[in-house]
Image (cartoon, rainbow, N blue to C red):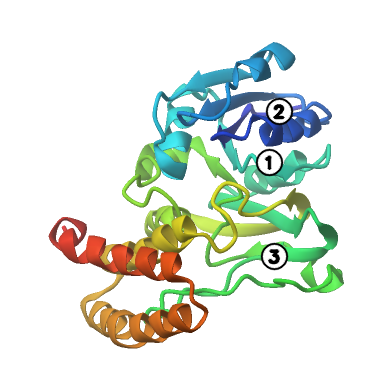
Amino acid sequence: MKKEPLVSIITVNYNQSVVTSQLLDTLENLTYNQYEIIVVDNGSTKDNPEWLKAKYPSINLIKSGQNLGFAGGNNVGIKASKGEYLLFINNDTEVPANFIEPMVQLMENNNSIGMVSPKIKFHWDPSIIQYAGFTKMSPITIRNQSIGYLQKDSATYNTTMETHSIHGAAMMVKKEVINKIGLMPQIYFLYYEEHDWAVKAKREGYKLYYCAQSHILHKESLSTGKDSPLKTYYLNRGRLIYTIRNSKRRDLLLSLLFQFFISLPKNSTIFIIKREFQNLKAYWRAYFWVIKNFKQLSV
């Protein structure tokens, strides 16, 4: 009987040690035997994560010393990992005891699979789905749809299948894939980096899968705020970065025309009507940042 492969579980903490502790509590109940837990503290300024190491002595607590963003924090974890499979999981999640086995088994049985995400359900109502796979990314709007979003969990979403992208809240990646495509792209800081990473994996011939037999519960946007200026800035900046890095010439032109001449005026008007002026300011900052850095993004 083949020994279970080692899984490196990597989560990033930023000023949320209590939330991270709630995840670690659930990880203590795992039925999978071969794993390590790496907690990367991303330069927390409002709390001291040292008590996590005292409460969970088996974890590898690494302090980055500064906020490196989602990709940067996870990359610190990658460099410290020893596993054949790396499981990146948001700290604002909780997991059932047996959620690792189906993903490992899926990847062990099919060498062409490079990345897998489980079913993601909302913590506030575990009967409601957040993610059951992604539709194809539109080459013009640079948006995709999360299959099953806000729908009741049912047999409809119980089929494991190939998907167009994985979900950053929970994704298992073969170390072999990372060795080929490199670390998570840090230029994003937040949002769209997992989609960029997934595109790279597909270019190397790997498949992406949604694993219906595994699930997690996601508290969602605790770090950034659901409709915060921080989220507005990085989400829209990330979308534009992804456009420039991954679009073919014709699609790039059409997409940028759409983003600047349809999305920008439309969303700006909505922010003004709602009197969300901080979000408006963040939105425009995202566009100005991309214009300023366009040449280095297009290389």
Badge 1 amino acid = Val
106 lies left or right of 292: right
Badge 2 amino acid = Glu
The residue that label 3 is drawn on is: 132
Q: Nearer the viewer, mark 3 or mark 1?
A: 3
Which quadrant would residue 235 be assigned to in this image?
bottom left
Which of the two discs, 2 and 1, labels the residue nearer the N terminus? 2
Residue 12 at x, y = what percent? 55, 35
Describe the element under mark 1 as helix, strand or loop.
helix
Describe the element under mark 3 as helix, strand or loop.
loop
* Alpha carbon separation for disc pair 2 and 3: 26 Å
Instruction: Tell me whether the residue at label 2 lies in contact with that at label 1, contact meaning CB atoms closer than 8 angstroms.
Output: yes
Whether 187 is drawn above or below 129: the answer is above
| Residue 15 in sight in this render | yes
In the picture, which quadrant includes the N terminus? top right
Badge 3 amino acid = Ala
Describe the element under mark 2 as helix, strand or loop.
loop
User: How busy is the neighbourhood of tag 2: few (under 14 within 10 Å), some, or many (20 plus)?
Assistant: some
In the rendered structure, find residue 4 and report the number of the disc placed on it: 2
